Each structure stands twice: as structure tokens, then as C-alpha cells.
Image: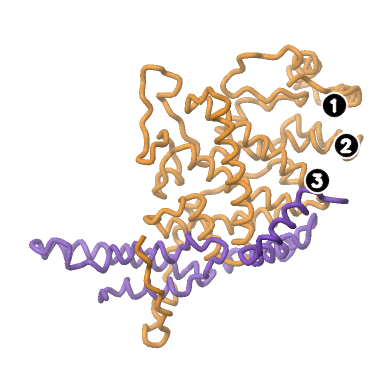
Amino acid sequence: MASKSCATCLRALHRQSRLIPQRASRLTASRAFTAIAARHLDLNPGQNAAPRSSIPPVDPERAEGRAKPPASKLPSINAAQALRKVTGRATETYTAYGATELLYKECALQADYSIPQAGKDDQEMPKTEAGEDLGIGKGWWLTETGLQPTFSTWSQVTMLHMYLIAARFRCFPTLSQTQTWQQHLLDHFFYDAENRMMVNHNMHARGTRNKYLKDLFIQWRGLLAAYDEGIYKGDAVLAAAIWRNVFKANENVDIKALAQIVSYMRRALKGLDSMPDETLMSVDLQFGSPKDEANVVAMKSKMMDLPFEKAPGKDLPPIKKA
Amino acid sequence: MSKSIAYKHYLRALSHWPKDSLRPECQFQDVIRRRVDRRFLPASSSNAPNAAQATANSAIDEKAELVQVNAIYSLLENRYSGKYPIKGTFLKPASNPTHYTDLVKELEEAPDRSWWSLQVNKWKGFLRFQ
């Protein structure tokens, strides 16, 4: 993808490089050459190569998601915001691209896993019962829920977090702004998903990857509608949506974990709702973990104490044996 | 019917679970009912020789099952939307105030659409005139 920077964009970039304080001399040098460097395509990009574009690359250390966000904002975002005052909304899409990359990285590290056997021809990858490649990973999602570190778990958990952010994007003032930000977030996800398919799962055939990416897109559209319905209609509907998507309608789901995820989503939405647009756009946020919701879920419900005679349930129709 | 308290709680809780008309073949209450029947009902088929172990196993199951059923109750009583309420402006987002109401209306109408109206809608979505 060669750089398609028009003259206006190049002028904007040069102006941007003058606005940055001196410490970014390394970045200034790379930015001055970005348009030219992009024309020489790197045919063997590294594992986490930044997407080819005329936007300055994200600092790789920060992008790995290991470090906590720095107290001061990144120079690229500072510069972008300063630039916005000068050029108005013309640069919205460039700011959005950089910010959504950081937001996406925050989503992607929640259920992150690795496959040590990937890329080594002599080692066989372990598989789950369903035949999926099994990796190793840490964190609440992969250890306490009964979910296994596979690509589908990672993609569903990432999409859940992306959904929370996309729902918050809807609260932007104009529809075009919402659509820009949502689209960039989604693009980052699909780019990374394809990268992981190639790197972790040895899918070198583009046709196979495209098939899975199409499925992933259908899953994304499905869960947008399902989670929206859940947010609007109540906790039970949201729990059913999470059960269908994340747990794949598994009969042996841990309902306590399900309730913890519902509680976590509600808390995250409340936090995102009370966050002003500026904080979101400068990516000044970090997700928590559903493990903090264990106490809320463990509280005894009043319905447990209702005697059965006073409040009998409707008897369910007999289950048809498949 | 099993005399287990947890089983009775399950039946009551699942009967209150909202029915999903859009996904009739994949209902939470049906699947969990199947699992609960499998666990509680065939008490006679479990190996009787070790009666003490059987009671010990069922005691552990009972506590764990009560935890699960408590979670179902908590979801039914909307504990989490009550604890973490979102402002009304989130449900009427600035970029598209009727987003959620439109979506819910669409989801309610979708299962009952005739073949013809499905085709009309498909083409309406494909050719959108500003």
C-alpha cells in the first residue's frame, strides 16, 4: 500500500513536525521521510510491523501493551491535537487512526495468548477437543472462566471490549465522526487478526485467512446487535448474548463467571459514559478485570429466600430430545 | 422429580428467563435445563455401592449449584444495571438518538417478516437514496 499522501497532507505533516517539541528529533527525522520510505515497500515486515501509512508509527514499546500509559500524552497525539486547532476537522481521520490503534491494543491484550510451537516446522501444535490450536495465556479470561487460550476466545474477548468502545463512539456529536472512529478501530482489529492467523497459526494461504476473516466480520456484526439488545433490554438478555458469543452456547458454562462479565461490562459502560470525549480521544483509559466483580455476584439474591409455595415458577415445557 | 433445593431453584429461575424470539433454537433456559436435568434427575443411575461418597459428591454439587443459581437470580433481578446505571444520554446517543429503539423494533419485527418483505428490505438496504 504505497503512500497516497496528497500535497495538502504532506504540508500538514511538515507543519506538524515543526509543532512538536525538540525531544522528538528521532520522530521528526522519520516523519520527514515517511512519504518517501513508504514507496519502498518492505516485503518482509517484522512480526508487529506498523501498518504502512503516512501516519507516524506508534512507539513499539508502548504498543505492546506491557507498559502502563505514560503520565504525559504521546507527542504524536499532542501534535495531532495542536494541529486540529489549526486545520479544523480535516485531520479527524488521522487523529482517529492513531488513537484507535492504542485503544485497540488495550482491547487486544485482555485475552492475549501465544503459541510457542508456531513457526517451528518440527513441532506439532496442541489442539483442543474441537480441533482448534491451543496456546498458553494468562489473565482472568483464560484461567477463571473455563475458556481456553485459542484464537476464537481471543477474538471474542477482544470484540467484546471493542464493542464497549464502539458503543461509546456512538455518543460523539456527529454521525460521520462516529463512523470514522468505529471504522478505524475495526480496521486495526482485522489487520491484527490476520497477522495473528499468519504468525500464530501458520495460515499462509490467503484464501483460508479470508474465509476466517469473513466469518469474523459476521460475528462482529452479530455481536454488535446482540450486545446492543442486551444493553437496552437488561442483564438477562446481555448474559444470553455473552453466552452465545463468548462461550459459544456451551452447556457447561460457569454462570457465575457469566454474571461477572455482565457486571464488568455494565461497570465499563458506566465508566465510559462518564468519560468526556477528550479523555477517550487521548486514550487515557485502561480496562479493569471481571475478577473484581466476584463479590458483587456472590451476594445472595432475595429470590433465594422466597418460599417455593408463595412464588412458584412456571413449569417449563418438556425438552424435546434431539 | 429430584428433591434437591437447588434443582427447585433452577426450575423457578429458568422459568422467569426472558424468551428470545429471534434465536429460537439457541435458548439459554433450554440448554441450562438440559444440563440441570442431566445432573440432578438420574440419581438412581449413579453407582449405589458407595453411598457415602454419593452423598459427599451431591453435597459439593449442591453448594456449587446454589452459587450458579444465585448468579441466575442476580441476572434476572437486573442487579448489575441497577448497581452501575448509565445516564439516559448513552441510550440516546448524540450521533443517532433512535439507534437503540430502532434496533429493538427491528429485532422484534424480524422473525415475523414474510418472504416478500424480506426481499423488499434487502433491496432497500442495497439501494439507499439520500
Question: Toward which corner of the image does residue B58 lie, by quadrant?
Answer: bottom left
The image position of residue A316, as x and y in percent, is 41, 74
Q: CA distance from mark 2 to mark 1?
A: 14 Å
- Whether marks 2 and 3 lie on the same chain: yes
Disc marking residue A101? none
Q: Nearer the viewer, mark 3 or mark 1?
A: 3
Name the side, left or right, on which A58 lies relative to B13.
right
Chain B is which colour?
Answer: purple
Circle 2 is placed at which residue position? Answer: A90
Residue that label 3 marks: A177
**Chain ID of residue with mark 2:** A
Subunit under mark 3: A
Marks 2 and 3, the one that precedes in the sequence: 2
Residue at mark 2 to residue at mark 3: CA–CA distance: 11 Å
B89 and A280: which is toward the camera: B89
Q: Earlier in the sequence, mark 2 or mark 1?
A: 1
The answer to whether A215 is drawn above or below residue B87 in the figure is above
Nearest to the observer: residue B57 or residue A106: B57
Q: Is residue B72 above or below residue A88?
A: below
Q: Which residue is found at the position 46% from the left and 30% from the top?
A: A114
Please give left or right for residue A79 compared with residue A148 in the image: right
Residue at the top extreme of this rendering: A40
* Quarter of the figure that contains the N terminus of chain B: bottom left
